[in-house]
Image: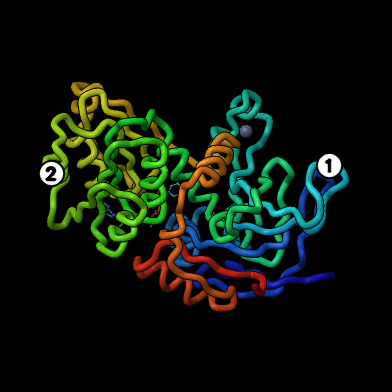
């Protein structure tokens, strides 16, 4: 049996292990992908740390990781539109294809969706098996580093384009990699002002490079002040919650305009109280966002990059996969944007 290197959650305890596992065998509707680059997601950190969510979600052993780009290495006999060597990425939510939403073409709302690198083997490996439904053909003019971030860029895009952006004023809470990418997407889509709030100056600096009009360190500055500085009188038209912090959610409510629209991507991890009367009296619209739309979001990302969207300032570190501990360490320090692991020599 052929084997490959893979980063495996081997035991139900903190940590991640570089292991030798069988190369996945593929079915008739599958594509075997040789992984070139992966990036580390917050989800991978949860799994590494083996927190409460990971303990109840991840069966061990499990190859983790879901943000990747690679090339087609083998195809099942039902696969006709990919050939060996094509550059591809993959959608990390594998929808069931049969539920009501799937049947209606709303696969991002599948209630039985499976997560790559969560409940099925992931991409932190030399090879990954993907069902044809989840393989995304990449424009080879787009750098591999950028393609490898399409999954989180998709979260940013899906959230930022949830509501009309042209001429609108945006508030983004959380300047993590996704908040920073959403900043660039909102600007690309024609937002007037994008104010980004965080408590981490390193990340606010990245947000500036991604096009934030004003950044706010909420430990010492207020979002109301930022509004004043910009001459805004009525509050933000569109707010994107990308921190998972309940206080940030509160600041979104108090800074939204009447009729404001709010998209929430951040995961609070606990029950969070909000002032519902503000939602009612101010006529706010709130939308929860999970994953990416299949595949509208993927088209939007591709065409935005092709028309000048630049997300490279968010990529701050690159390591060989054998140095994965360093990658996880820098991610955990919060002194990073996206961290890439290389799986092939360049
Ligand atoms: P991240 O954890 O790297 O970034 C979150 C940022 O929020 C950090 O920079 C942190 O300093 C900041 N923050 C903390 N408290 C804050 C406060 N009071 N005000 C403003 N900012 C504050 O996360 P990420 O990878 O960029 O992802 C963003 C969020 O989206 C996370 O909550 C993540 O769990 C969630 N997420 C959701 C989906 C989905 O499908 N819904 C997918 C991916 C990530
Ligand atoms: Zn479904």
Q: Is residue 204 left or right of residue 229?
A: right
Residue at the image position 55 percent from the left and 40 percent from the top: 303
User: How many numbered marks have been drawn onto this rendered protein structure?
Assistant: 2
Give how far apart the Cα atoms at labels 1 and 2 are. 56 Å
Percent from the top left, x then y, of residue 165?
37, 32
Mark 1 and mark 2 lie on one chain; the one further toward the N terminus is 1
**Residue found farthest to the front:** 307
Give whichever of 88, 346 is nearer the camera: 346
Q: Residue at x 27, y 35 (%)?
A: 169
Residue 229, numbered circle: 2
Residue 247 position in % (x across, y down):
22, 47
Locate residue 144: give its quadrant.
Answer: bottom right
Which residue has dot 1 on it? 80
Q: Is residue 74 above or below residue 11?
A: above
Location of residue 272 by image quarter:
top left
Badge 2: residue crowd in 10 Å (few <14, some 14–19, many ≥20): few
Query: Residue 328 placed where, x, y %?
Result: 46, 70
* Image quadrant containing the C terminus: bottom right
């Amino acid at each position: 049996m052929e084997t490959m290197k893979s980063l495996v959650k081997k035991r139900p305890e903190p940590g991640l292990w570089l292991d030798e596992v069988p190369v996945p065998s593929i079915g008739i509707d599958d594509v075997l992908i040789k992984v070139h680059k992966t990036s580390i997601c917050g989800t991978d950190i949860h799994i590494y740390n083996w927190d409460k969510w990971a303990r109840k979600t991840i069966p061990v052993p499990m190859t983790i990781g879901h943000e990747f780009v690679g090339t087609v290495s083998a195809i099942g006999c039902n696969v006709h539109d990919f050939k060996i060597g094509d550059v591809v990425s993959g959608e990390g939510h594998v929808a069931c294809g049969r539920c009501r939403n799937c049947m209606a073409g709303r696969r991002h709302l599948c209630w039985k969706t499976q997560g790559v690198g969560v409940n099925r083997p992931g991409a932190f490996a030399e090879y990954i098996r993907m069902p044809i439904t989840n393989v995304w053909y990449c424009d080879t003019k787009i750098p591999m580093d950028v393609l490898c971030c399409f999954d989180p860029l998709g979260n940013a895009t899906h959230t930022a384009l949830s509501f009309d952006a042209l001429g609108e004023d945006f508030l983004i809470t959380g300047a993590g990699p996704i908040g920073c990418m959403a900043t660039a997407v909102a600007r690309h889509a024609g937002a007037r002002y994008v104010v980004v709030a965080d408590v981490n100056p390193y990340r606010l600096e990245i947000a500036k490079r991604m096009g934030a009009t004003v950044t706010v360190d909420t430990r010492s500055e207020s979002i109301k002040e930022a509004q004043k500085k910009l001459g805004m009188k009525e509050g933000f038209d569109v707010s994107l919650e990308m921190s998972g912090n309940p206080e940030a959610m509160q600041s979104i409510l108090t800074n939204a305009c009447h009729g404001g629209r709010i998209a929430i991507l951040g995961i609070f991890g606990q029950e969070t109280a909000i002032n519902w009367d503000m939602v009612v009296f101010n006529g706010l619209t709130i939308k929860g966002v999970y994953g990416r739309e299949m595949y509208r979001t993927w088209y939007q990302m591709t065409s935005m990059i092709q028309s000048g969207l630049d997300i490279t300032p968010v990529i701050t570190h690159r390591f060989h996969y054998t140095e994965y501990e360093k990658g996880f360490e820098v991610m955990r320090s919060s002194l990073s944007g996206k961290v890439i692991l290389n799986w092939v020599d360049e």
